[in-house]
Image (tube, rainbow, N blue to C red):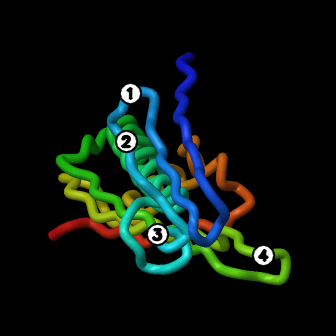
């Protein structure tokens, strides 16, 4: 199986420094800073990158499980919100909220929701984030 990688470089101290991140393919790259991570500044941040990875992984896993159950989807759209909060031990990711809307013909809501929960539990990024509470809001379009 492939091994994926990315690089980051940080220059300076935490508050006034800045950094860059880049995936091995160059498809993901950007600048980040204290402001982009802990405030509303310009640039990316680790939590945004985790959110993108989780949304993509869940969408693929869900589409696969739906197809295996005989309900290939027309579309699976997922957004992920990664919550970074300050606690007693410092900053930490406290939860991820996955919001998914899908267009799937011929599936009843109970089956759809059951498969969505299985995708949430089974996608590799969800498993990597097992220490974090993951919430799911999944609904059929239409």
Callout 3 secondary element? helix
Query: Distance between the Cα atoms at labels 4 and 3?
Result: 18 Å
Query: Among all residues in the image, which is located at the extreme right?
Result: 89
Callout 2 secondary element? loop
Quick check: 97 above or below 56? below
Along the polypeptide, which appears first: circle 3 or circle 2?
A: 2
Query: Among all residues in the image, which is located at the extreme top?
Result: 1
Residue 90 is labelled as: 4
Horizontally, residue 101 falls left or right of residue 56, namely left
> From where the camera sits, is residue 117 visible?
no
Q: Which residue is mark 3?
A: 36
Residue 25 is labelled as: 1
Residue at 28 percent across and 64 percent down: it is: 101
Residue at 36 percent across and 32 percent down: it is: 26
Query: Distance between the Cα atoms at labels 3 and 1?
Result: 23 Å
| Closer-to-camera residue (74/87) | 87
Local crowd size for mark 2, using a 10 Å CA cut-off: few (<14), some (14–19), many (≥20): few
Along the polypeptide, which appears first: circle 3 or circle 1?
A: 1
Q: Are marks 1 and 2 in contact (CB under 8 Å)?
A: yes
Q: Which residue is mark 2?
A: 28
Query: Distance between the Cα atoms at labels 1 and 2?
Result: 8 Å
Callout 1 secondary element? loop
Query: Distance between the Cα atoms at labels 4 and 1?
Result: 33 Å
Residue 91 is labelled as: none
Horizontally, residue 14 falls left or right of residue 83, namely right
Query: Distance between the Cα atoms at labels 3 and 2?
Result: 16 Å
Q: Nearer the viewer, mark 3 or mark 2?
A: 3
């Amino acid at each position: 199986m492939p091994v994926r990688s990315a690089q980051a470089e940080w220059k300076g101290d935490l508050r006034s420094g800045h950094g860059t991140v880049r995936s091995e393919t160059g498809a993901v790259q950007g600048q980040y800073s204290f402001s982009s991570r802990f405030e509303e500044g310009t640039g990316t941040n680790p939590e945004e990158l985790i959110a993108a990875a989780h949304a993509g992984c869940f969408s693929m896993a869900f589409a696969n499980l739906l197809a295996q159950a005989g309900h290939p989807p027309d579309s699976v759209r997922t957004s992920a919100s990664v919550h970074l909060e300050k606690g007693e031990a410092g900053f930490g990711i406290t939860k991820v909220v996955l919001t998914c809307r899908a267009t799937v013909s011929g599936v009843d809501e109970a089956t759809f929701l059951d498969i969505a929960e299985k995708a949430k539990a089974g996608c590799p990024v969800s498993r990597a984030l097992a220490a974090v509470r993951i919430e799911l809001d999944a609904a059929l379009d239409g």
